[in-house]
Image: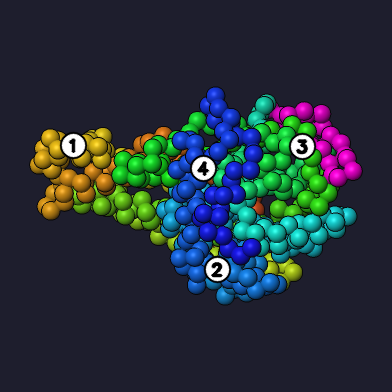
């Protein structure tokens, strides 16, 4: 099957999966109020690839069918740039508000399949073969894939990685003729109601003796024993005037329980192999997938700047403080754009003929975004002030007695109509103040680990060659009197 349409995607969601939200077990995610808006919103991302085929589609390297460009295994710097165009189209569709559109996992598994030498090391040849075969299945069927990679937090003092005997973390408990049996839980399966399949792959390195937890596989969402417990829905009704974002972009987050789930042999990518589990995420995974994540972030930041500027213009706010805050938003977006551009222009081969962007600029951006996005929301709220809470609904505009009064008393500056002003401020509130906005800020604070943890990591892993050279100049130069450079100065003991 070549690249799917939105309608084809929606038809695939009603497969009997076990989804819980509130007090309900949901049988039809495409029709339930908590999920219908996002299901149809995500369907739009599948239609985007047909609207912009030159940017979003490519020929499958084996079948020639048109597939999503996010499945590309880049083989050159030009391929990295080619993939950027498609990823940008998807980011623009949701203005970066959905962090787990299917292109995220498409890029991830293309990167994995690009390095079968890494996945096939340490005696895991069969797992690597399965993974490469799965990536072909993923791209040829245009699968919507999500992941769950973090172990549940039960006792922080025990660390992030499970130790032997942990009965909560996902682990292998047995084998059958057809595969292995796994039990436990993982978090946080964003996009769970709207994915066709679920991926489990390595996260935190495991200690010795934790072989039963060293697992990687992909299985259908409707696999018996899989249970998804969703957070409270942030979705509103389908009215895009009143709720332009939360009516269609609540991608959901789910706690995943594996209640003795059978994983077929051909779907296993790592089977209790700690050595390969701990090494496959250490090289090209990050620079590869960060191209998608940072294009999304850049798009969201640029949208925030444009929205804040439009908000200020609608009330003719030219105060120096407002201009300063708008300039601050611009710098966020421009820094993000520059990091992505630098990473792509300095793309390199990471082994086995696979080319990915340079990781350092993306690492810097990843460590900074958790601090920028809360500030973005703060700025929009400061500029919006009380106006964010004084925007009529579409029903109020449609009331014949209210409409003339709204048009007169709730218009904007100059020729900005009341309807235009309401659209701007309702969009701004949905971006920063609604239930979905609160979830979005929490998501960005901990997206691919917290800002604090990422700052620690980049310090420990960054290339200090030039920094050390600059410092060493002063620490290793001869000791002389700068007023007479030729005269050495003796260093003696202090009397």
As rendered, which of 451 and 142 lies closer to the eye? 142
Mark found first going from the N terminus, 4 or 2? 4
Observer-side mark, 4 or 2, equals 4
Q: Is mark 4 on a helix, strand or loop?
A: loop
Badge number at residue 30? 4
Mark found first going from the N terminus, 3 or 4? 4
Q: Mark 3 points at which residue?
A: 261
Per the rendered image, the range of residues in magenta is 157-185
Q: Is residue 225 visible?
A: yes
Residue 68: within the magenta?
no
**Proximity of marks 3 and 4: CB atoms separated by less than 8 Å:** no
Mark found first going from the N terminus, 1 or 2? 2
Q: Mark 2 points at which residue?
A: 57
Residue 184: within the magenta?
yes
Q: Position of residue 428 (x, y in %)?
A: 32, 44
Mark 2: give few (<14), some (14-19) or many (20+) Cα within 10 Å: many
Q: Which residue is drawn at 60% across and 52% down?
A: 144
Q: Mark 1 points at which residue?
A: 399
């Amino acid at each position: 099957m070549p690249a799917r349409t939105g309608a084809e995607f929606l038809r695939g969601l009603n497969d009997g999966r076990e989804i819980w939200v509130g007090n309900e077990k949901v049988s039809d995610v495409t029709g339930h109020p908590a999920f219908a808006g996002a299901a149809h919103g995500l369907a739009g991302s599948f239609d985007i690839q047909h609207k912009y085929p030159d940017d979003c589609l490519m020929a499958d390297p084996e079948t020639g069918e048109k597939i999503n460009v996010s499945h590309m295994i880049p083989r050159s710097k030009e391929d990295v740039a080619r993939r950027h165009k498609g990823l940008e189209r998807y980011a623009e569709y949701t203005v970066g508000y959905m962090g787990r559109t299917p292109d995220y996992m498409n890029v991830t598994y293309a990167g994995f399949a690009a390095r079968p030498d890494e996945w096939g090391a340490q005696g895991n040849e069969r797992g690597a073969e399965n993974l490469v075969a799965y990536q072909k299945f993923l791209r040829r069927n245009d699968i919507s894939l999500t992941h769950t990679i973090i172990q549940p937090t039960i006792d922080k003092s025990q660390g992030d990685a499970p130790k032997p005997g942990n009965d909560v973390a996902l682990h292998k408990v047995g084998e059958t003729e057809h595969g292995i049996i796994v039990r436990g839980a993982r978090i946080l399966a964003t996009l769970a109601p709207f994915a066709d399949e679920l991926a489990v792959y390595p996260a935190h390195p495991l200690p010795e003796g934790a072989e039963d937890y060293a697992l990687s596989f992909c299985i259908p969402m409707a696999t018996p024993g899989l249970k998804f417990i969703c957070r409270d829905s942030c979705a509103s009704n389908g009215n895009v005037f009143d709720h332009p974002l939360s009516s269609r972009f609540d991608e959901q987050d789910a706690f995943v329980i594996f209640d003795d789930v059978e994983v077929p042999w051909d779907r296993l990518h790592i089977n209790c192999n700690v050595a390969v589990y701990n090494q496959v995420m250490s090289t090209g995974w990050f620079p590869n997938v960060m191209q998608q994540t940072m294009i999304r972030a850049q798009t969201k930041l640029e949208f925030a700047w444009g929205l804040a500027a439009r908000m200020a213009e609608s009330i003719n706010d030219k105060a120096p403080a407002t201009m300063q805050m708008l300039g601050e938003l611009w710098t966020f977006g421009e820094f993000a754009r520059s990091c992505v551009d630098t990473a792509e222009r300095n793309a390199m081969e990471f082994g086995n003929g696979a080319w990915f962007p340079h990781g350092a600029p993306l690492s810097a951006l990843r460590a900074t975004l958790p601090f920028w996005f809360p500030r973005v929301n703060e700025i929009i709220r400061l500029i919006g002030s009380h106006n964010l809470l004084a925007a009529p609904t579409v029903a109020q505009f449609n009331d014949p007695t209210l409409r003339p009064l709204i048009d007169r008393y709730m218009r904007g500056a100059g020729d900005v109509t009341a309807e235009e002003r309401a659209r701007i401020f309702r969009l701004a509130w949905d971006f920063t103040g609604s239930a979905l906005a609160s979830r979005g800020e929490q998501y960005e604070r901990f997206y691919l680990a917290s800002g604090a943890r990422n700052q620690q990591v980049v310090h420990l892993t960054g290339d200090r060659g030039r920094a050390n050279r600059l410092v060493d100049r002063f620490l290793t130069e001869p000791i002389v009197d700068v007023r007479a450079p030729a005269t050495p100065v003796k260093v003696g003991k202090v009397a």
